[in-house]
Image (spheres, rainbow, N blue to C red):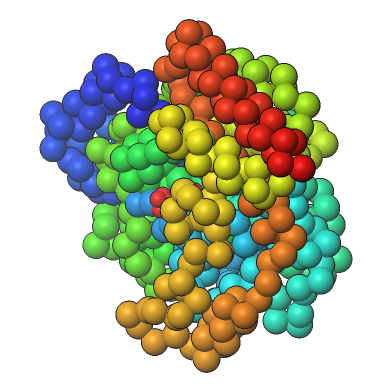
Amino acid sequence: MPGFELFGEEERKEVNDVMETGILMRYGFDGPRKGHWKAKELEEAINKTFGSRYAQLTSSGTAALTTAMAALGIGFGDEIIMPAFTFVASFEAVMSVGAVPVLVDIDETLTLDPAAVRAAITPKTKCVMPVHMCGSMANLDALQAICDEHNLILLEDACQSIGATYKGKSLGTIGAAGTFSFDFVKTITCAEGGVVMTNSEDVYTKCDGYTDHGHDHKGADRGADLHPFLGYNYRISELHAAVGLAQIRKLDTFLTLQKKNYRALRSYLEQVPEITFRKVPEGGEDSCSFISWFLPTEEITKDVVAELKEQGILAGNFYWFVNNWHYVRKWDHLKDAKALHNLSSKQRNALQKIKEAKFEASDAIMCRCISTAISLVWSEDQIKEKGEKLVAVIKNVLARQTQKA
Ligand SMILES: *Cc1c(COP(=O)(O)O)cnc(C)c1O
């Protein structure tokens, strides 16, 4: 998964360009920066690599989502339909623009179930936000059809799925806008950063201003810029962009290794007929940053995960073990509406609803799901060892279950 695993010389060189001029900001200082425009260059590289028409870098993936929502006109009281399995950042962005999160069930794609989306539409619905979790994707054709039918905005949170494609297009470039995160554990890292991609000039222009106090960036110098609307500071720095630039040039290498290691580990898991794999929609190509698979029952999965943990084999289950950031079941701070600022009554009601809601279909999937992050630097021997240990643990637990039955 993470670009930080292959890090060094190239990043140092790009950062040194910036260090030598001392111009750490992406705007202005045209003379002293001696031709170095790392953020601009990275935006161009993103468009070229992923096929988006416009790209706006931000200070984080969370900021990218917030910016995208603002630029798409999503705000106070608007309902956003999103999956119950996501990273809290997607949820936070919704809350921060005053919108109302409506969580719905996932299917075996590990993200939005189109039928659940359809059932959740109300007159207040403005946006459908699939979160392409763990390297793969939602059924985007089905979601786009629902959006077209109900005049809704499709916003892709592709923060975890850099390099995955759907019907030949990069994730994040298919909806009205899409986002990547470049935080430290993502496929491309620049320590902290993110991007909004869009094919709409209007959405891009709004992102450009929103991330920089509303500056229109059309003045002869910064002081001469106009401010057509309210903005904030979600800028990326030149230092961060420099790291990202070195990383994006290595993306093909990252993806090749990721896919190779994924296939190698999967071949072990495929030896166990009881295992099934996360569903990739037709026409989709997984980035392979994770391998996600299902066991037959909750009990078996729980035993397998416990045993793997005991043996020090990294294989996560978001239902019980991993953390309280990804699956709705563990989000007590959100359900209890613990915010520092005032939430609107609509947001409070939405959180109360989430607290009372039952996500039975999602529970049934998440409690049987194990996800393993794919490393770029595993050796063949390491994969063999990991694969053999995984299979041994699973077969043991399965045999014990059969004995019990
Ligand atoms: C990482 C991530 C984000 C944004 O995270 P930042 O750490 O703010 O860059 C958003 N959504 C998902 C699904 C993510 O995994």
- On the image, the x and y values in percent for residue 316 come to 51, 41
Residue drawn at the location 70% of the way across and 75% of the way down: 125
Tell me: residue 76, above or below residue 208.
Answer: below
Residue drawn at the location 53% of the way across and 21% of the way down: 389
Q: In the rendered image, which quarter contains the C terminus? A: top right
User: Residue 231, located in which quarter of the rendered image?
Assistant: bottom left
- On the image, the x and y values in percent for residue 2 come to 43, 31
Spot the residue most to the bottom. Answer: 345
Observer able to see residue 163: no
Tell me: residue 85, above or below residue 281.
Answer: below
Observer able to see residue 244: yes
Tell me: residue 318, above or below residue 68.
Answer: above
Seen from the viewer's position, the closer of residues 97 and 287 is 287
Seen from the viewer's position, the closer of residues 133 and 402 is 402
Residue drawn at the location 67% of the way across and 59% of the way down: 363
In the displayed structure, does residue 222 sit left or right of residue 265? left
- On the image, the x and y values in percent for residue 281 come to 78, 40
User: Residue 311, located in which quarter of the rendered image?
Assistant: top left
Q: How many numbered marks have been drawn onto this rendered protein structure?
A: 0
- On the image, the x and y values in percent for residue 183 come to 38, 43
Residue drawn at the location 69% of the way across and 58% of the way down: 362
Tell me: residue 27, above or below residue 207.
Answer: above
